[in-house]
Image (cartoon, rainbow, N blue to C red):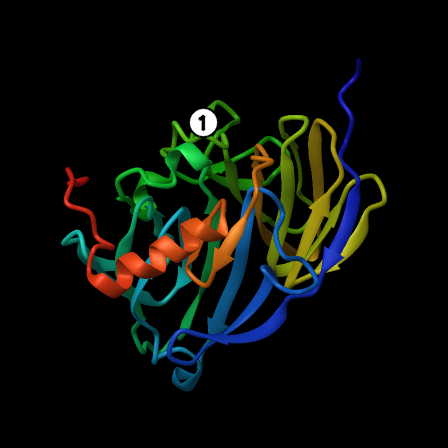
Amino acid sequence: MSPSSRRVAQVVTPEPVVEGAGVHLRRSIGTPRLDHLDPFLLLDHFESVSPADYEAGFPYHPHRGIETVTIVRKGEIRHRDSLGHRGSIGGGDIQWMTSGSGILHEEMPQVRPEGIGGLQLWLNLPAREKMSRPKYRDLQGEQLTETQTKDGARIRVIAGETAGLVGPVEGLAVAPKFVDVTLPPGSTIREVVPRGHAAFAYVDHGEVSFGSSRAPVRAPALVIFDDGDTVEASAGPGGGRFLLAAARPLGEPIARHGPFVMNTRAEIEQALQDLRVGHFIRDEPRDG
């Protein structure tokens, strides 16, 4: 069977939301219109040069049962957590956090002349890993070498494999493929994506055309693909940039309450109880 190009199934315009202590975002996954795209639970796009839109940040808050992936395009975010990690991530850096059984953390954007910009994605954890120990992967920009393909695309591989490159994030149950793609004017890309995996592209800059229809999509927009073997994209006259993401669906029940995502309501109630009585952070070996 010859490889088939994935068609565009849906284009979603992100909705404005306010989260944390007053951070203005655009949300495309995790809304009444699109509750989730198994195993993706949430996708937020933050971008502003106005401090009032972001400086209040995300003070200390809990997570259980998910992974959060934060991709910083510009600016700086300082973070600390209940495991003793602290530091900052800036333009080009990525933070991949596995909350597992429970973590408390804060993310505080810093006021800079360039403002702040980036994406945050939530990935669901399978039932057998929801109570695993929490851990962090801080990926500095230099760990993600940008490579130019023969068709002119510039790519950074975060997870999965492409063009002979393997991303630094490996060994996850949903086998994610995350590729950061920049398309200069006139460039194209054809990327293999495992059949049966959920796949989307989030266009956060410029204009990009996808699939055989070549209908242009202007940022900001979420593009959801039908099943197939490859994702094809070409740049508009001004070029464009997008995150290509794909992962194996879990097909498990989802029970969610704010920052907690479990499989049953009883597990949500247990998380809330653990938080109330001070047992949320478990006494177990911790990731260093």
Q: Given the image, on which type of amino acid does mark 1 rest?
A: Leu
Screen quadrant of the N terminus: top right
**Residue at 41% of width from left, 70% of height from top?**
116
**Residue at 56% of width from left, 38% of height from top?**
252
Q: Is residue 13 left or right of residue 216?
A: left
Front-most of residues 188 and 181:
181
Screen quadrant of the C terminus: top left
| Camera sees residue 167 | no
Q: Is residue 183 left or right of residue 65?
A: right
| Camera sees residue 206 | yes
Front-most of residues 45 and 237:
45
Seen as rendered, the residue at the extreme right is 213
Q: Is residue 270 above or below residue 194?
A: below
In the picture of the structure, the residue carrying the numbered disc 1 is 165
Which of the 4 quarters of the picture holds residue 11? bottom right
Task: Give x and y (percent) for residue 111.
Answer: 31, 78
Which of the 4 quarters of the picture holds residue 285? top left
Task: Give x and y (percent) for residue 93.
Answer: 34, 52
Q: Is residue 107 above or below residue 283?
A: below
Task: Give x and y (percent) for residue 126.
Answer: 46, 36
Task: Give x and y (percent) for residue 165.
Answer: 45, 27
